[in-house]
Amino acid sequence: MSQSDDKDILSSYLLTYLMSEKIMDLDSSEIPDSPTMLNILGYALCQRFEQDNNPADLERAVYVLDQAVQKLPVASKIWLGSANNLGNALHLSYEHSQDEKFLNRAIQLFGQVVEHTPLDSAGLPNCLQNLCSCLLERFAATQNMADLDRAIRAWQETVERTTATSPYRSVMLSNFANALLMRYTLTDNLPDLAEAIKILKLLAEETPVDEPDRYECLELLGKSLMGYYHQTRELSDLEELIQVMEQTVAMTPRDADYLPVLINFLAYALLTRYGRMDHDADLHLAIEKQEYALSLCEADSFYHMQCMHNLGSALCIRYKLTGDLADLDRAVALLERAVALLEPDSHVKSAYHQNLASALRTRFERTENLADLERANQLLP
């Protein structure tokens, strides 16, 4: 048995002892003198708080961990562990009470832990993650950009210090990308969006295709690439969007329930290029992709509604190109079915009604069927 195993067993025995003896009694005045015992006691109290949600456990945890930190030389190994545990206890206190003083102290402590943790320490990424999470929470409360900037710098350092095999890697990449996107939304700083796209690509590459969280990453990547193109209007950025989405669709299992969404991202990009370059092949390919996406959807699901609307809209575009009434008839039928599936308070209700009304009026101009005009007027009185 290794020395490390011996220490883990000893810590386990100590934890069991502390959890069972009167030292865990909140009415007891007994507190150990040893910083090590204080640290373990504080950790045990935090564990019990998370089980029982008794604020007195958390209050005592903060007290005994603070005692441990004060008794130890700053930057010593056990001080780093105790300070980290105290930071976690303070963070729990903030989440429980929403008292900002706990969050401020937690940030101060996590900053000190990061500062004094050796650069080659395996625990540094986790320390940085703790600091970043607290900074982002304080930013959400105060909107102080300095906190967001500091969190982004720390996350960048965290990502640089972790490998693809790290258990925290995907969470760190995701948080880093989201923080960059948050700052881009607030500042319109295009390099932030470009860096977020780079990180999301890396996350997509490292995430197994059967991982449930993969869809969120791919959806965010698609939206970010679209946003980048709409900012730059560079054809090369649109080509990159198409290429990335083609690869993403090809790598996604056919039975993944989010595959229709990814296909629709690709179809949207193809339609955008059609609008830009006027290549008929892009329009036909986009419709072909949307037909495929629709075939994968469960009947009457949200994705089914979305795919019917998107395909109907694309068929309206092709009708204007070819004048084929069959395209327009099918577009109206699909758009009607999509509208029928809308929830009464849906945020897309207005857009869906407008597109259907437009298709109906276009068909009225061709066939002079008053029923189409009446239905359009009913949708948009």
Image (spheres, grey):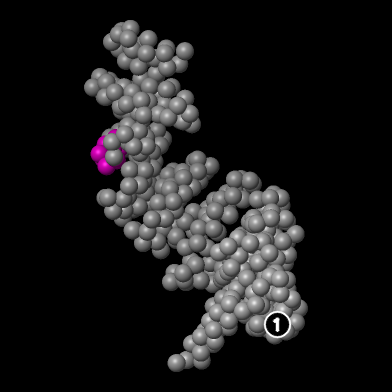
Q: Quadrant of residue 205?
A: bottom left
Residue 328: horizontal and vertical position, in percent?
29, 21
* 126 w.r.t. 347: above or below: below
Q: Residue at x 32, y 47 (%)?
A: 257
Q: Residue 325 placed where, x, y %?
A: 25, 19
- Nearer to me, 145 or 229: 145
* Magenta: main secondary structure: helix
What residue is shown at x 71% (from left), y 79% (from top)? 31
Residue type, numbered disc 1? Pro
> In this image, 298 relative to 306: left or right?
left
Q: Does residue 74 lie above or below 292 as drawn?
A: below
Q: Position of residue 264 (x, y in %)?
A: 36, 40
- Give 276 or 94, whichever is nearer the viewer: 94
Question: Is residue 313 at all visible to an observer of this figure?
Answer: no
State whether residue 222 appears in this view: yes
The x and y percentages for residue 347 are: 48, 31
- In the picture of the structure, the residue carrying the numbered disc 1 is 32
Disc 1 is placed on an element classified as: loop
Q: Range of the magenta residues?
A: 287-297
Please tell me how crowded label 1 is: few (under 14), some (14-19), or many (20+) other residues with Cα within 10 Å: some
- The magenta stretch spans residue 371: no
Q: Residue at x 69, y 55 (%)?
A: 97
Q: Quadrant of the N terminus?
A: bottom left
Asked where in the image residue 64 lies, by quadrant, the reply is bottom right
**Towards the viewer: 186 or 91:** 91
Seen at 33% across and 12% down, the residue is 372
Using the image, determine if residue 219 lies above or below residue 72.
Answer: above
